[in-house]
Amino acid sequence: MQHVKIPQDRIGVLIGEGGETMREIEAEAEVRLDIDSENGSVAVETVGDPVRGLKGPEIVRAIGRGFAPEDAMRLLEDDMMLFDVVDIDAAARNKNDMKRKKGRLIGEGGRTRELMEELTGADVVIYGSTLGIIGAPQEVDAVRSAAEMLLDGAPHGAVYSFLEEKHNEMKHQGMEYHRFPGGQS
């Protein structure tokens, strides 16, 4: 059994309307969730396949970090799906710096965050003092690198170029990998 602590304002999202989201997570990840809505503590107990059960706490953590439940459930799509968090607060000197860095990651009208998603294929959420990423290993790596570049003060243009480059690399690898759909030559 694992314990995950999530922010108070995300408990309703985790439970869902009439407990619907919670039941879906329990069924899909083969876990049992014991949610303490007083302190935000969630006990996650594996009741089925242990490998799927390992994703249970990650799904709860992802929802706690601002992901919509359906995006968090992507972690079950494939064993390679990862959830990662970039701590914006750790890169900031003070509250104002934190606000500025968060703004750089979001971009004007949310454009930078959207580009991170579009060019990598990962889901990206900025919530509180963290940037959360769900995706395949190379997608998560690309977003983490781009976020760190922005937090270190790199110009947005340079970061967009980096993301374009990563996008083309992943597309090229994808074409190599999926050359014969359905296994026919």
Image (cartoon, rainbow, N blue to C red):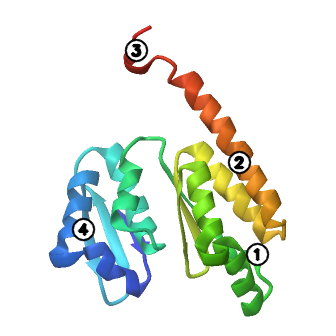
Q: CA distance from mark 1 to mark 3?
A: 46 Å
Q: Amino acid at mark 2?
A: Glu
* Residue 132 located left or right of residue 4: right
| Nearest to N terminus: mark 4 or mark 3 | 4
Q: Look at the numbered discs 2 and 4 and tell me whether their residues touch, using CB distance below 8 Å.
A: no
Image spot of residue 82 (x, y percent) = 51, 51
Q: CA distance from mark 2 to mark 3?
A: 29 Å
**Which residue bears the numbered disc 3?**
183
| Nearest to N terminus: mark 2 or mark 4 | 4
Q: CA distance from mark 2 to mark 4?
A: 35 Å
Which residue: 37% across, 87% down?
A: 39
Instruction: Note whether 158 is above or below 3 in the view shown.
Output: above
User: In this view, which residue lies farthest toward the top?
Assistant: 185
* Residue 127 located left or right of residue 34: right
Label 3: state its secondary structure. Answer: helix
Q: Amino acid at mark 4?
A: Thr
99 vs 40, nearest the viewer: 99
The disc label shown at residue 164, or none = 2
Label 1: state its secondary structure. Answer: helix
| Residue 5, image quadrant | bottom left
Q: CA distance from mark 4 to mark 3?
A: 36 Å
Image spot of residue 137 (x, y percent) = 58, 44
| Nearest to N terminus: mark 1 or mark 3 | 1
Q: CA distance from mark 1 to mark 4?
A: 34 Å
**Which residue bears the numbered disc 4?**
21
Circle 1 packing at 10 Å, graded few (<14), some (14-19), many (20+), is some
90 vs 136, nearest the viewer: 136
| Residue 165, image quadrant | top right
**Which residue bears the numbered disc 1?**
91
Which residue: 74% across, 57% down?
A: 160
Query: Which is more foreground, mark 4 or mark 3?
Result: 3
| Nearest to N terminus: mark 2 or mark 1 | 1
